[in-house]
Amino acid sequence: MSDNASQPTSRSFMETCAGLGIKQAFTAYNNPKGNADTEPMMRTLKEELCWLREWPSADELKTALDTFVEDFNSGYLHSALGYKTPNAFEQEHLENQQATLNLAASLTGCITTYSHVLPTMQESATNKLEKMMFGT
């Protein structure tokens, strides 16, 4: 995700990305917080990996980057995630989502189980209402 600053929107940068098969994605205009969550991660990546040394080959950088991302997601605590790792946060989210789906399925089961009672209740209420209004 990129903002609409001069570097990522420059012709040469966009052509280079296209030539490498990189599809650019931009934040909305006039949205200063559009990539605010991405910026700290990119800063950490630069400080803890990219700026520490010269990279003799793209393959070596890619291997180091893959390792960095794995370590980042499994071991780096984030204040924005309640001091959990991204992997732990995602796992918790998935478990909560599954619990919600299980509850919804359970409630749907209750409605299905008692659906045969609803027409009887409705019919009874209708009969009582008719008696009250029309004395029948």
Image: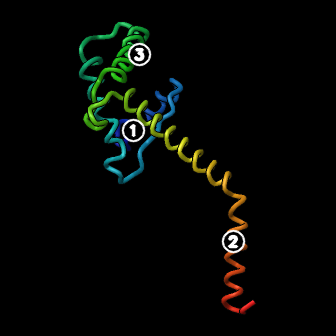
Instruction: Indicate the quadrant containing the C terminus: top left, top right, bottom left or bottom right.
Output: bottom right
Residue 96 placement (x, y as % from top left): 45, 39
Amino acid type at mark 3: Asp
Count of numbered marks: 3
- The dot on residue 2 is 1
* Residue for point 39% across, 36% down: 8
- In the rendered image, the vertical position of residue 126 relative to residue 96, given as above or below: below
Crowdedness near tag 2: few (<14), some (14–19) or many (≥20) residues, C-alpha within 10 Å: few
Tell me what residue is drawn at x 53 percent, y 45 percent.
103
Q: For this view, does 79 lie left or right of residue 71?
A: left
Q: Which quarter of the rendering shows the N terminus?
A: top left
- The secondary element bearing badge 2 is classed as helix
Measure the C-alpha gap from mark 3 to mark 1. Answer: 21 Å
What amino acid is found at the position of numbered circle 2 in the picture?
Gln
Q: Position of residue 6 (x, y in %)?
A: 34, 40
Q: Secondary structure at mark 1?
A: loop
Give residue 20's position: percent from left, percent from top: 51, 23
Q: Amino acid at mark 1?
A: Ser
Q: Earlier in the sequence, mark 3 or mark 1?
A: 1
Residue 17: mark: none
Q: Which residue is depicted at the point 25% across and 35% down?
A: 79
Depicted 48 relative to depicted 10: above or below: above
Q: Nearer the viewer, residue 83 or 3?
A: 83
Mark drawn on residue 122 = 2
Residue identifier under label 3:
66
Q: Is residue 54 left or right of residue 124?
A: left
Secondary structure at badge 3 equals helix
Q: Quadrant of residue 55?
A: top left
